[in-house]
Image (spheres, rainbow, N blue to C red):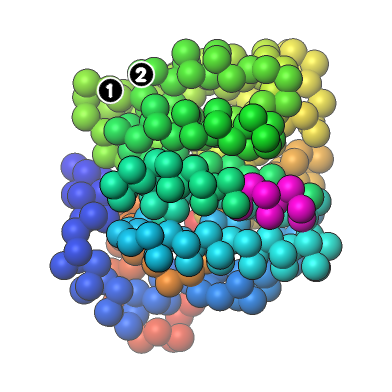
Amino acid sequence: MLKTVLLGLSRAPLMKRIVVGFPLTRWMVDRFVAGETIDDCLRVTHRLLASNLLVTIDFLGEDTVTVAQADRVTDRYVDLLDRLAAEGLADRVEVSIKLSALGSLLKDGYELALDNARVICAAAARAGTTVTVDMEDHTSTDATLRTVRALRTDYPWAGAVLQAMLFRTSSDCAAQTGEGTRVRLCKGAYAEPPEVAHRAKSAVDRNYQRCATILLEGAGRPLFATHDSAMIAHVTSEANRVDRTASSYELQMLLGIRSDEQRRLAGLGHAVRIYVPFGTDWYAYFMRRLAERPANLLFMLRALVERPGKKRVTSGF
Ligand code: FDA
């Protein structure tokens, strides 16, 4: 119930103005978002790399309403990729993109978003790294997968994201098991209707495990995005069963969530990649993180009645 309310609010302009304008929110946002500039984001990236973690960087934005805005997001990614190359980070750091940030919600938006995604992939190819296309709500699934297929003609390493909460996902996984195919499997962060998605956590978890097995039995490079220990245990035991090496798949988590576990898994020899968002347009991303764990909301409310700086809680997520 609370989750549905928070996900609804993630798209409410008035609530956005209130939350973004409230000074203490920033303190909480800092847990999930690596600052506003490329320099901020690279500082966090260097810290993660020093702990043997890999990184995927997301320039936040999903409210693109003009072509000029979509172009600015694209340019920002190109700048970022040039910096990754210049600093010798491209072997360990890739980028994640959202088609809505690249213009998909405008008229003929998917063509525009594809053109922009091609520009970003070209910059990634020059830098020597990869791009993963995030998945948004279920109304965009077909168009997003079509876009990834189009990108793969020139950039076969372009990654797709599939969401275990959707009924369709096991067949989408089965269709993406070819040699080298990069697919990130997550549970799904959007409020979806019961016609298309599992609602119970147990059903989402069962589907995640089923999809994970399909991807691991294939010849691709699966990327398992989850903080859920039961999902991770399933992935590692299935990887052993099918004789996968630890370097042939990745475990992925979000910045600021289970940071100790991220380092522990990397210490065991797993390839662990952290999703690092940065930028000023953090509102929707932040609200989805609150929705995933009501305790985060309680934590934030408590922060509002305490003086900032008086007590900084640094663990838990
Ligand atoms: P679940 O929500 O069941 O949480 C398991 C445990 O993890 C919790 O008990 C808690 O300990 C911890 N946890 C999870 N979320 C937390 C939070 N916000 N704060 C604190 N603790 C938390 N979604 C999407 O729809 N499209 C996409 O493209 C992506 N991309 C993506 C990339 C990467 C690298 C990750 C890790 C995740 C995504 N997601 C996503 C988000 C994903 O769909 C999902 O919403 C979250 O990962 C939470 O699901 P879990 O699998 O962690 O399980």
Tell me if mark 1 has few (under 14), some (14-19) or many (20+) residues whose alpha carbon lies within 10 angstroms of its own.
few
Residue 117 percent coordinates (x, y) = 54, 47
Q: Secondary structure at mark 1?
A: loop
| Viewer-closest of 52 and 153 | 153
Against 245, residue 130 (above or below) is below
**Is most of the magenta stretch helix, strand or loop?**
helix
Residue 304 percent coordinates (x, y) = 29, 77
Q: Left of 142 or right of it: where is 173?
A: right
Against 11, residue 227 (above or below) is above
User: How many numbered marks, from 0 up?
Assistant: 2
The structure residue drawn at horizontal position 39% and vertical position 27%, both measured from the top left corner, is 142
Query: Where, quadrant-wise, is the N terminus in this rendering?
Result: top left
Cα gap from disc 1 to disc 2, whole angstroms: 6 Å
Is ligand 1 within 8 Å of the beta carbon of the residue shown at mark 1? no
* Magenta-tinted stretch: 120-127
* First reached walking from the N terminus: tag 1 or tag 2: 2
Q: At label 2, which amino acid type do we have?
A: Phe
The structure residue drawn at horizontal position 39% and vertical position 76%, both measured from the top left corner, is 26
Residue at the far left: name it: 14
Q: Which mark is residue 196?
A: 1
> Would you name the residue on which mark 2 appears?
167
Q: Secondary structure at mark 2?
A: loop
Is ligand 1 within 8 Å of the beta carbon of the residue shown at mark 2? no
The structure residue drawn at horizontal position 55% and vertical position 28%, both measured from the top left corner, is 149
